[in-house]
Amino acid sequence: MTETVKTQIEAIRRSGETNMLDVNMVQWIANRENYFELVIYLEEHRKEYVNYLFTGEAPAE
């Protein structure tokens, strides 16, 4: 997980616009905000994303 992806996740989290476990909505917001790195990351690494939400631990890049 890159720093860019982490920053994009945190931006959506701070917006309070959706429950972060609603991955489809997070991906929709990311697309709307042009966070394309996050859109792609969510397609390929959903388990790692959820783990990051619960533990704060990001997998190595």
Image: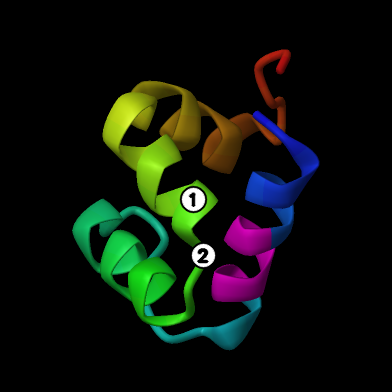
Q: Magenta span covers which residues? A: 8-13
Name which residue lies at 49% across and 50% down: 38
Q: Residue at x 71, y 26 (%)?
A: 57
Q: Quadrant of residue 10?
A: bottom right
Q: Label 1 amino acid?
A: Leu
Q: Secondary structure at mark 1?
A: helix
Left or right: 31 as drawn, with respect to 15:
left
Residue named by callout 1: 38
The colour scheme applied to this rendered structure is rainbow
Looking at the image, which residue is at 72% across and 34% down?
2
> Circles 2 and 1: CB distance less than 8 Å?
yes
* Residue 28 location (% of width, % of height): 27, 70
In the picture, which quadrant includes the N terminus?
A: top right
Where 8 sits versus 41, above or below?
Answer: below
Type of secondary structure dominating the magenta stretch: helix
The picture quadrant where one finds residue 26 is bottom left
Q: Reply above or below: 31 against 61.
A: below
Residue for badge 2: 35
Q: Is residue 10 above or below residue 46?
A: below
Please provide percent x and percent y for residue 56.
70, 36
Residue that sits furthest to the top in the current view: 60
**Quarter of the figure with residue 42:** top left
Q: Tell me the amino acid under the disc marked 2.
A: Tyr
